[in-house]
Image (tube, helix red, strand yellow):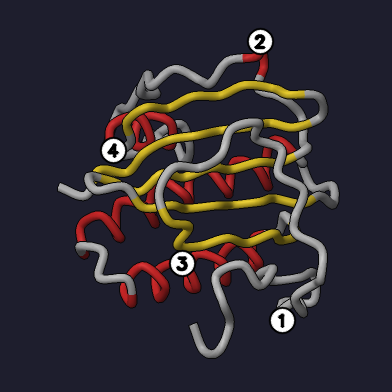
């Protein structure tokens, strides 16, 4: 992680590292995380910052000897979720995302918080796949929640005040 600690604050709007603050981040989850915190970032909801955070995450998990399959699954799941926050929850507006990962003996617990728009109807989208009629009419989107629900366990979403809170686990095996 090139001299940055897991809780150092992550990437800011300029695309560069944010200096650590003396204050601890506001924790919108009302329960303590179980396990050791491996990774934490607070960052601006933009495509380029999401890419930087995912690169940092992969490096951090590799240094923590997380199995390669779990790293690949965590990257795919979190890329889908974080890009959805940027594209749908904030819909082009400025906003912050907080991401925490902690370790359990059998998986990685991921907690994502944002203050964007809540899910329609207050619930996560279903895992239904979009209709596909290859090769000419394959839709660009619509596969994300199927991927997320296929690879993650223990998905839980709720709205707490202004916060969207999503918790999930990436199995190690």
Q: Residue, x 56% and y 33% (percent of image)? A: 166
Name the outermost residue toward the bottom.
3
**Circle 3 residue:** 57
> Which badge, 1 or 4, is on the more N-terminal residue?
1
- Tell whether 41 sits left or right of 107: right
Asked which secondary structure carries label 2, the reply is: helix
Q: CA distance from mark 1 to mark 3?
A: 15 Å
Asked which secondary structure carries label 4, the reply is: helix
**Circle 1 residue:** 16
Mark 3 burial class by Cα count in 10 Å: few <14, some 14-19, many 20+: many
**Circle 2 residue:** 121
Q: CA distance from mark 1 to mark 4?
A: 31 Å
> Which badge, 1 or 2, is on the more N-terminal residue?
1
> Which badge, 4 or 2, is on the more N-terminal residue?
2
Between marks 2 and 3 in the image, the one whose residue lies nearer the viewer? 3
**Circle 4 residue:** 151
Q: CA distance from mark 3 to mark 4?
A: 18 Å
Name the outermost residue toward the top.
121
Q: Residue, x 53% and y 21% (percent of image)? A: 124
């Amino acid at each position: 992680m090139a001299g940055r600690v897991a809780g150092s604050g992550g990437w800011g709007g300029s695309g560069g590292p944010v200096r650590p603050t003396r204050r601890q981040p506001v924790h919108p989850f009302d329960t303590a995380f179980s396990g050791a915190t491996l990774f934490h970032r607070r960052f601006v909801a933009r495509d380029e910052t999401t890419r930087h955070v995912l690169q940092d995450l992969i490096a951090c998990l590799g240094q923590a000897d997380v199995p390669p399959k779990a790293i690949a699954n965590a990257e795919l799941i979190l890329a889908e979720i974080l890009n959805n926050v940027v594209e749908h929850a904030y819909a082009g507006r400025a906003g912050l995302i907080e991401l925490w990962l902690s370790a359990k003996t059998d998986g990685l617990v991921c907690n994502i918080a944002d203050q964007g728009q809540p899910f329609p109807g207050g619930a996560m989208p279903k895992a239904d796949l979009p209709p596909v009629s290859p090769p000419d009419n394959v839709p660009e989107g619509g596969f994300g929640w199927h991927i997320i629900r296929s690879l993650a366990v223990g998905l839980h979403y709720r709205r707490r005040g202004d916060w969207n809170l999503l918790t999930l686990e990436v199995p190690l095996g």
